[in-house]
Amino acid sequence: MTKKLNSIWRDNGRVWCAVSLCVMAADAWAHAPLLDCYVEADQIKCEAGFSDGTGAEGKKIMVLDAANKLLLQGVLDKSGSFLFKAPSGEYRVIFEGGEGHSVTMYSAQIS
């Protein structure tokens, strides 16, 4: 009887461990950072937020060149947007949404 109970606990323990990992992964993705940048008139407009609908007002956004030099930085406005004049050459935009929440978009992806 004891062997059977140990086997049940061990098997259920594996199931609960797998379920817990899935739940933790789902929680991590529930607040994933999102970033989209596109050309609007003669500027680049970036919009950022989180997958759970949380806004990103006041969060940091940076533009770096191919050599990792900081070209400009600012914060997202109340609508989660940031406008800037496109620098010459290749660059990337980084949205810093907080601890463990950053996302990068490269100039080649912006149209």
Image (cartoon, rainbow, N blue to C red):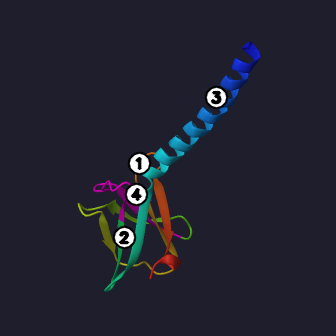
Report whether 99 appears left or right of 81: right
Q: Which mark is residue 31?
A: none
- Asked which quadrant contains residue 72, the reply is bottom left
Q: Which residues are magenta?
A: 48-65
Q: Secondary structure at mark 1?
A: loop
Residue denoted by label 4: 51
Which residue corresponds to the image point at 55% horizontal and 71% vertical from the top-left? Answer: 66
55 w.r.t. 21: above or below:
below
> What residue type is disc 4 on?
Ser
Residue denoted by label 2: 46
Q: Nearer the viewer, mark 3 or mark 1?
A: 3
Report whether 65 appears left or right of 86: right
State the residue in front, 28 or 38: 28
Q: Secondary structure at mark 4?
A: loop
Residue denoted by label 3: 13
Structural distance between the alpha carbons of marks 2 and 4: 16 Å
Report whether 86 appears left or right of 16: left
Structural distance between the alpha carbons of marks 3 and 2: 45 Å
Of labels 2 and 4, earlier in sequence is 2
Image marks 4 and 1: residues in contact by CB distance under 8 Å: no
Which residue corresponds to the image point at 57% horizontal and 39% vertical from the top-left? Answer: 19
Of labels 3 and 1, earlier in sequence is 3
Q: Secondary structure at mark 3?
A: helix
> What residue type is disc 2 on?
Cys
> What residue type is disc 3 on?
Gly
State the residue in front, 95 or 16: 16
* Circle 4 crowding by C-alpha within 10 Å: few under 14, some 14–19, many from 20: few
Q: Position of residue 98 (x, y in %)?
A: 41, 48
Q: Nearer the viewer, mark 2 or mark 4?
A: 4
Residue denoted by label 1: 98
Q: Nearer the viewer, mark 3 or mark 4?
A: 3
